Image (spheres, rainbow, N blue to C red):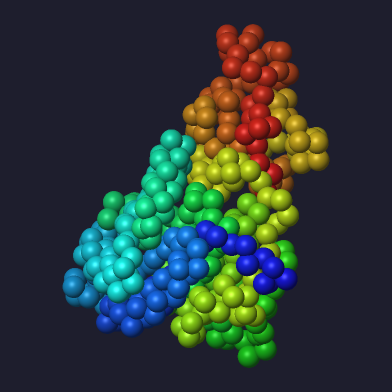
Amino acid sequence: MRHEILKNIKRLVIKIGSRILTAGENGLDRGTIDRIATQVASLRASGHEVIIVSSGAVAAGRSALGLVGRPRTIPQKQAAAAVGQTRLMRTYEEAFAAFGANVGQVLLTREDLADRQRFLNARATIDTLLGFGIIPIINENDTVAVEEIKFGDNDNLSALVTTLAEAQLLLIMTDIDGFYSADPRTDPTARLVPLVRAITREVEQAAGGSGSSVGTGGMATKLVAAKKVVKSGVPTLMVNGSSPEIIIRAMAGEEVGTLFLPAGKGINRRKHWIAYTLRPRGRVIVDQGAREVLAKQGRSLLPSGIVQLEGEFERGSCVRVCGPDGTEFARGLTDYSHAEIAKILGHRSHEIEQILGYRYGDEIIHRDNLVLL
């Protein structure tokens, strides 16, 4: 099965974590980066298009600032990234130059991908770089990102980039052999799971947190990333980045790491953008009848089904749609602001114009803008 899935992959995203790229507190590990470049060059020679989502900028720059351990504040992280990003890119440039390959830097914030036009512009940039034979090296723009717009970890970023670039595989390089049934650092009975057919609640419960001073992600964030990717119909492969020739072996179909199978056909790119790229601005709580109609019949959300609102948002914002118990089951783009919905919730659609004095449409969230989670 694995060989059949991987043999037709042309474009892939490789996510490389800080723990793979850095030598403890001593900055970048040039030997590891050289080995990665060798393997990526081999993939390119066989016809693959490779996009790299790379951590390591903050870790590379903190030694110059005299920081011990992970930066504790956003300004410290931004300063470390400003110093380290140039060092990281220079190292990649030198490593790939040995194979006659060039790299291009792409720095992103969540805001870049939340805006649909900028999302499409970023996609066009990546496509153009690949068209010229350039290897895109993508990282979060830590020098300007703040809490409200930061991705939070490059696992999440790699999932969004996989969808952005319409890649056919996400390959996550981490510091353990793959996904385990429990945390192998604390549970001696933990076993490697080579194949995950579906990311269930039991699978999610087996994931733990971050255990490093140089990385921001852990198994939990990698699982969230894998879930986003497989939802779009794309497989995810998690491997130990420290293993020899791991990229080549993985792409050859060798039984290494953990393969997460795609979730059937997957949702379309725009709905994936709504569900996983946009930051929800509020919550719309619906009654049980509306929940069942939305979940089982694929209908639009009407004002009559809404019982409560939380948060403030404008027309066109992404909002969480929650059932009577408060559990989120969908997300969507609202056709009305929170102030407008507050006046018309519980009412019939034909009453909207009478209450507001105008009407954008009958739906609060049209089914084309609604994604079931």
Judging depth in this view, the residue of 308 and 322 nearest the camera is 322
* Residue that lies at the very extreme toward the bottom in this rendered image: 188
Residue 263: quarter of image = bottom right
Q: Residue at x 64, y 30 (%)?
A: 365
Left or right, 44 with respect to 80, comes to: right
Whether residue 183 is visible, yes or no, is no
x then y, percent, for residue 174: 49, 75
Q: Is residue 171 above or below residue 113?
A: below
Number of disc labels: 0
What's the residue at 64%, 80% (across, down)? 255
Query: What residue lies at 52% left-to-right and 77% top-to-bottom?
Result: 248
The answer to whether residue 74 is left or right of residue 234 is: left
Q: Locate the N terminus by quadrant.
A: bottom right
- Rendering coords of residue 315 (x, y %): 52, 27
Q: Is residue 103 left or right of residue 275?
A: left
Residue 293 pos. (x, y %): 79, 35
Q: Is residue 273 above or below residue 306?
A: below
Residue 365 or 6: which is nearer the viewer? 6
Q: Relative to residue 52, is residue 39 depicted above or below?
A: below
Q: For the point 28% across and 78% down, which residue is it?
A: 27
Say which quarter of the image contains residue 290.
top right
Tell me if I can see residue 61 in this picture: yes
- Foreground residue, 200 or 258? 258
Q: Is residue 29 left or right of residue 11?
A: left
Q: Is residue 203 or residue 166 the one in the foreground?
A: 166
Residue 306 on image: x %, y %: 69, 31
